[in-house]
Image (cartoon, rainbow, N blue to C red):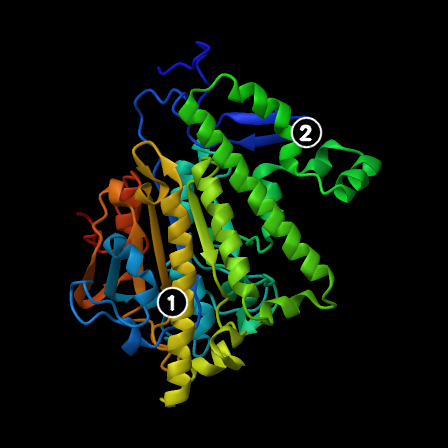
Amino acid sequence: MVVTPNNKALPDRRTMLRATGLACALPLLEGMGMDGAPPPARALWVFLPNGMNMGLWRPKSTSLAQLSPTLQPLAAHRSALTVISGLAIEAGRAGADGAGDHARAAATFLSCARAKKTDGADIAAGLSVDQFAAQHLGAATPLASLELGCEPGRLAGGCDSGYSCAYSNTVSWSSPTTPCAKETSPRRLFERLFGDMDAATDVRARALARARKRSILDWLSDDAKRLSGTLSAPDRAALDAWLTALRALEKRLAAAEDARAQVPNPELLTKGTGSHAELIELMGLLLTRAFEGDQTRIATLMVGNAGSNRPFREVDWSDGHHDTSHHGKDPKKLAAIGRINAWHMERLATLLDALSAAREADGCVLDRTIVMMGCGISDGDRHNHDDLPVLLAGGRALGVRGGHHLELTKPTPMANLHLAMLRKLGIKAQSFADSTSALPIGA
């Protein structure tokens, strides 16, 4: 076991800084005895709504030497990408259920199980792959999984042609009848991960602290100083970088809240240039800190709810996203969809940047994190659930091959990818949903 300069071995990976009523998980430091064990394997599933402009999305060859227009923002991560063509979700098709493709797109994205068509309380879908993974890996971390989103949405009532809002507003199901509500507030997520100084003080002290804009980390400073005195120089630098990153996040959140307080309707912020990008970036940075501190190893992120109709003034388009996806081959709408898709890839690139910058052991957090991003619909106008736009990023240290376009010769169950990811996470699953075999994503 590695020991510190003061000859005191540090506790395990989830070492905590503690103050009255507070606890803050730390990243992996060299002095934390890991008994030769590698950093953990992790997975993140990212859902995008309304499909893609497939002509601008699809790579032209099996090589990613030349990225498609939509994928250009990901050029810096080219070697870590696998673009997959030919995946299908059979349960997403209409069958006898008729309309409601957007609800089915989200409900089946991670479960690959048919959703019961109802807008009442008798909802039923299937166990999602993230929750399957959490059942196997979740006991090792404080949080078994994180379910995040960038648009609020209720889980009751009807949202799409007779389908419950539960189907449209979550992709994560802990059982066939239990949808997992997602967190859409960066402030609440921060407090869930790193604690809230309000829990440690009475009403009067809280008011004084807020007036002075005290950071949660101020309450941990003495504990941090004591720990710092026991660390090697590299670990002191790592600890300082970690605390600095958390403080920077706090400042950004505070600034966002100050701006929100000046706007009568907070929802207006999501319609302003750059504000939605800020929300997505903050969620990604907080998720990165959660992975880096080993607070969870399993997460989902809904960038938008199924059928989301927010306008994208960020790309000079004021019509709703869902309305635009019904393009009818209109060149202007198709071009707008392409710009929206590329904007989403820019957000993904920012997330991958953060995961790459977070260091652990002899690599980065992205090396041991498989990020899967995709849509449950291919072309928003056709509402088809085959040839879905899907990509993987990261996972190099887990044996995931990057830098290529995997073209499947016939429609292949999306569940085959889910099964392959489970196995890369070290879960010895024989099958998942309607899988026929594990997709070959290995190096």
Image spot of residue 326 (x, y percent): 43, 84
Of residues 316 and 433, the one drawn nearer to the viewer in this rendering: 316
Nearer to us in this view, 225 or 324 = 225
Query: Who is closer to the viewer here, 112 or 340?
Result: 340
Q: Split into 4 quadrants, where in the image is the N terminus?
A: top left
**Residue 335: percent from left, percent from top:** 38, 82
Q: Nearer the viewer, residue 418 or 3?
A: 3
Residue 402 seen: yes
Q: Is residue 351 above or below residue 201?
A: below
Which element type, helix, strand or loop, lies under badge 1? loop
Seen in the image, is 30 located left or right of residue 156?
Answer: left
Q: Is residue 424 above or below residue 411?
A: above
Q: Taking 65 as reference, is 181 left or right?
A: right
Q: Which residue is mark 1?
A: 376
Q: Amino acid at mark 1?
A: Gly
In terms of image quadrants, where is residue 417?
bottom left
* Mark 2 crowd level (few <14, some 14–19, many ≥20, 10 Å Cα): few
Please tell me whether mark 2 sits on a helix, a strand or a loop.
loop
Marks 2 and 1 close (CB-CB < 8 Å): no
Q: Where is residue 248 shown, x and y percent of the image? A: 56, 45
Kindly indicate the quadrant of the structure image that contains residue 156. Answer: bottom right
Position of 233 with respect to 193 (left or right) is left
Q: Which residue appears farthest toward the top when viewing the image?
A: 7
Identify the residue position indicated by label 2 in the image: 21
Mark 2 residue type: Gly
Residue at screen point 16% across, 68% down: 61
